[in-house]
Image: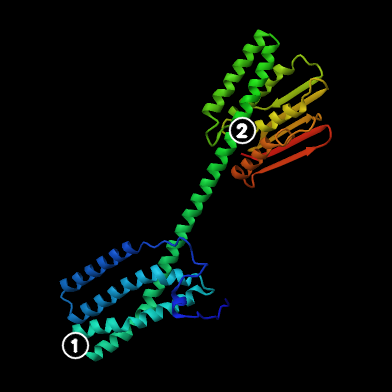
Amino acid sequence: MSALSFPASFHDLFAPGPDAPPSAPRPIARDLLLGLALWFMALLFLVAIGAPHEPQLYGGTLLAVAVLFHAVASRWLIPAALAWPRPFGSYWLKAFLVLVASVVPVGLVVLILTGDPEVMVGFSVFQVFFHLLLTAPLSWLIYRRRLRRHQAVAGLQQELGHSTASLDLLRSQINPHFLFNALNTLYGTALQENGERTAHGIQLLGDMMRFMLHENHQPFIPLAREVEYLGNYIELQTLRTATSPAIRITTSLSEAPPAAQIAPMLLIPFVENAFKHGISLQHPSWIKVTLHVEHGTLYFDVYNSVHARPAPGPADEPGGIGLRNVRQRLLLLYPERHELIIRRSLDEYFVHLTLQL
């Protein structure tokens, strides 16, 4: 429909089109009650000050028509007009037709109260232009402002619900993943029948489980706690590889600033991925993890060897489900505040994360 096209029928003029807002706010009852209360108070004020009969009549009638027009405009006229290419022009035309139609009932009321046909005609015409120039624009502004507020709140609720659901889903996928990996490592260590190492592994696992129970469900935690958890995980994995001289694991985790905060479990997937795909008990393997903070920016690198595995599934490939989850969390929690670089060759895998805390 072009900007100059007209409705095919009178019904089409007042019917909302397919582009009309689906959830336009319409607190009509409240507006009517408020308008009628103002109308009644205005009449009482005019009577109380002893105003002449004419101001009481004209003022009360104008205010009553304004209240009714605003209700009609909010309920039908404006929602229908918003679907047209020129919504305010369409609304203006609808308002003019409604006000012209109101001439008959308003004129009859004035004629009954005054008994003067000339007053009836003059006031009826006057009230059309009065409401067209004052009441109609005010009703439009009130409705649009209320609609924008309604849409803003709905958008925020939708974004909040989507973000919360996404984060909950990602966390529900991450938590069992790391817990079972840790338990498998502890099981392998126990099979080596080394009681001291097993006890130390249990202590590390207990610290990790406390972290996951108490801090993992908070939106942000001290970076120092995340680094501590990272160190515990690396130390727990090192128990499994301590008897293999062909495996080299080097770490450099700088002390985190006391005020630095980070989303929990954001760094560990990169390290877990390195141990899962970078360590082989049959081939020389190595992992290097570094972390430091400068001027409010975290720099995190994970560099590891890669060993071919027969027919890996999607969850077993480097950069599988765990790293996809991290990418989504970074987009949700640190938009425009992070840089993630991942490079892979046949025998090496490198991750570099820059994060503005």
- 17, above or below 126, in the image: above
Observer-nearest residue: 2 or 10? 10
Q: Nearer the viewer, mark 2 or mark 1?
A: 2
The quadrant of the image that shows the C terminus is top right
Type of amino acid under label 1: Gly
Identify the element where label 1 is drawn.
loop
Classify residue 8 as left or right of residue 356: left
**Does 52 appear above or below 265?**
below
Res. 30 image quadrant:
bottom left
The picture places residue 267, in percent across and down from the top left corner, at 65, 33
Q: Residue at x 47, y 70 (%)?
A: 16
Q: Is the residue marked by circle 1 packed among few (<14), some (14-19), or many (20+) residues within 10 Å? A: few
SS type, badge 2: helix
Tag shown at residue 115: 1
- The reply to whether residue 254 is visible in this rendering is yes
User: Which part of the image, by quadrant, shows the N terminus?
Assistant: bottom right
Seen in the image, is 167 located left or right of residue 295?
Answer: left
Instruction: Give residue 302's quadrant in the image.
Output: top right
Give the residue type that dot 2 points to.
Answer: Ile
In x, y percent, where is residue 94? Answer: 43, 78
- Outermost residue toward the bottom? 118
For label 2, the residue is 174
User: How far from the left and from the top, in percent, is residue 283?
Assistant: 83, 22
Q: Residue at x 39, y 71 (%)?
A: 73
Q: Locate residue 317 relative to residue 232 in the image: left or right.
A: right
Identified at 58% across, 35% down, the residue is 171
